[in-house]
């Protein structure tokens, strides 16, 4: 089965969603009840196929018209099913490989994956999961393989697989890289986070409201001031959303902007700004912010987020490497495009869409953007570079090369725990390597370095 489930290419600008207005967390009780008939499963099949093809990211897929056409219950089921499948994909494929000797067509592979996720992750009654999987297979050219789907799923019901083994959850090439970079224990701990459904982290416009909002949202206040809540459902109905009191931002993603420690009236440049989580933090801290991104569609999210929160920034659509503006800034944030492998908790598709060659290509872009950022610093200015990637070439390697070719710029060491960073994430050189298991309940993986230019 392995060759048929070899993974396709990385979508350009793989999903980020740090400031997404809608949670991807959906109620599992809907799924466990066995809700959702064939249309919900057919939509899940389309979404899973698209997410794994690299044609579209999961974010785009989740707002696809095929899902919008379903009723609320079916939509919740379809979304929960795709997320459950992607979060357990490595282990599901292992279980299937043991039972399917000759690789079936891709559509059947996806139906089998969804069937296994229904039975063993969502706890959908097996008879409903098997019957609907067979019915889906019966549609179109895969009809002759109905018997295979029936036999494989029934066989797994008789001998249930272990879908929770962390050693099976990540693609083997990525898992090998994590073992080499962080050691076997850390790699195992990172992989164990893949199957877990994340809670939702929020950044606040005004930290003075933390206690009030935490109580209204039944949230925990994390070090650094982010709120973490287990609430589910439509974010737009949550207390404080309409008033612009908060935005969704993973606890790790909120650390880099805090490390710039901008003060009122300082100038700040957010060089890869969309969808805008870090821009909002800088603006909320009182800086005069330029939010630049080369993607005009993604910048619309920045503008919407600014409008909702009542914060202001100058929004610029341009390539950061060639932007002709001559201004220099007190503080610059470069949240560079990257392989996004640290964001697998909300975007498990990145694990399966990424491929080894992407890392080198993205590292070249990051080098160019780091040089462009350094050129725009005022004397004595601060630069924070970050990537939501677990790959050393995009983090430690990038920074070593930058320092060696940039005279005068030095690392400004980050203290353990500074900006709400998990203390174990501090590297000896004062940069941060935040790993997904560094916070109880998980967090996005990030690499963060802070530099200062000569005065
Ligand atoms: C990691 S995301 C930024 C997330 C954002 N900082 C936040 O916190 O919401 C990377 C962004 O870099 C942008 N980007 C990629 N290449 C760029 C370039 N050459 N110039 C400017 N923006 C670029 C992408 O459009 C994408 O929005």
Image (cartoon, rainbow, N blue to C red):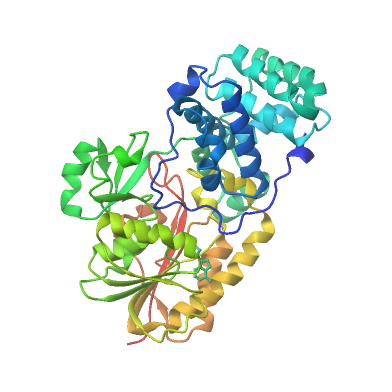
Left or right of 33? Residue 356 is right
Q: x%, y% of residue 38?
A: 61, 22
- From this view, report whether residue 145 is shown above or below residue 183: above
Residue located at (50% from left, 71% from top): 399
Q: Please tell me in which quadrant of the rendered image residue 312 appears.
A: bottom left
Q: x%, y% of residue 349?
A: 58, 44
Residue located at (74% from left, 22% from top): 138
Left or right of 288? Residue 96 is right
Q: Return the residue nearer the eye: 134 or 259.
A: 134
- Quarter holding the N terminus is top right
Q: x%, y% of residue 209?
A: 17, 49
Residue located at (61% from left, 42% from top): 170
Q: x%, y% of residue 272?
A: 45, 67
Q: Return the residue nearer the eye: 40 or 253.
A: 40
Residue 53 makes an appearance in the image? yes
Residue 415 makes an appearance in the image? no
């Amino acid at each position: 089965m392995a060759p048929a489930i070899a993974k396709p290419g990385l979508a350009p600008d793989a999903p980020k969603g740090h400031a997404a207005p809608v949670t991807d967390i959906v109620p599992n009780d809907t799924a466990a009840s066995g809700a959702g008939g064939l249309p919900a499963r057919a939509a899940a099949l389309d979404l899973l196929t698209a997410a794994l093809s690299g044609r579209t990211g999961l974010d785009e897929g989740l707002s696809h018209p095929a899902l919008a056409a379903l009723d609320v219950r079916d939509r919740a089921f379809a979304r929960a099913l795709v997320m459950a499948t992607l979060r357990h994909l490595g282990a599901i494929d292992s279980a299937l490989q043991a039972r399917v000797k000759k690789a079936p067509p891709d559509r059947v592979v996806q139906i089998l994956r969804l069937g296994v996720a229904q039975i063993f992750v969502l706890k959908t009654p097996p008879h409903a999961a098997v019957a609907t999987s067979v019915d889906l297979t019966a549609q179109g050219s895969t009809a002759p393989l109905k018997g295979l789907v029936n036999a494989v799923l029934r066989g797994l019901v008789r001998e249930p697989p272990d879908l929770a083994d962390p050693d099976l959850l990540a693609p083997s090439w990525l898992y090998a890289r994590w073992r080499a970079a962080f050691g076997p224990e850390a790699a195992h701990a990172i992989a164990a986070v893949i199957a877990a459904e994340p809670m939702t982290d929020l950044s606040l416009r005004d930290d003075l409201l933390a206690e009030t909002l935490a109580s209204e949202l039944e949230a925990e206040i994390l070090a650094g001031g982010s709120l973490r809540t287990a609430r589910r459902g439509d974010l737009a109905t949550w207390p404080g959303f309409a008033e612009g009191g908060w935005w969704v931002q993973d606890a790790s993603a909120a650390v880099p902007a805090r490390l710039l420690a901008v003060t009122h009236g300082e100038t700040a440049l957010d060089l890869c700004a969309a969808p805008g989580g870090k821009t909002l933090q800088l603006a909320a801290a009182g800086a005069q912010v330029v939010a630049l991104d080369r993607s005009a569609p993604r910048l619309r999210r920045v503008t919407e987020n600014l409008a909702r929160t009542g914060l202001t920034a100058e929004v610029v659509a341009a390539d950061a490497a060639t932007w002709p503006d001559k201004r220099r800034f007190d503080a610059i944030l470069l949240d560079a495009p990257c392989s996004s492998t640290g964001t697998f908790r909300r975007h498990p598709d990145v694990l399966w869409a990424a491929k080894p060659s992407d890392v080198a290509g993205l590292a070249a872009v990051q080098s160019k953007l780091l040089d462009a950022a350094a050129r725009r610093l005022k004397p004595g200015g601060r630069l924070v570079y970050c990537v939501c990637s677990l790959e050393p070439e995009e983090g430690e390697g990038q920074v070593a090369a930058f320092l060696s070719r940039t005279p005068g710029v030095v690392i400004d060491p980050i203290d353990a725990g500074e900006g709400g960073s998990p203390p174990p994430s501090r590297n000896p050189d004062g940069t941060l390597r935040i790993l997904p298991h560094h916070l109880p309940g998980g967090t996005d993986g990030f690499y963060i370095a802070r530099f200062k230019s000569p005065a």
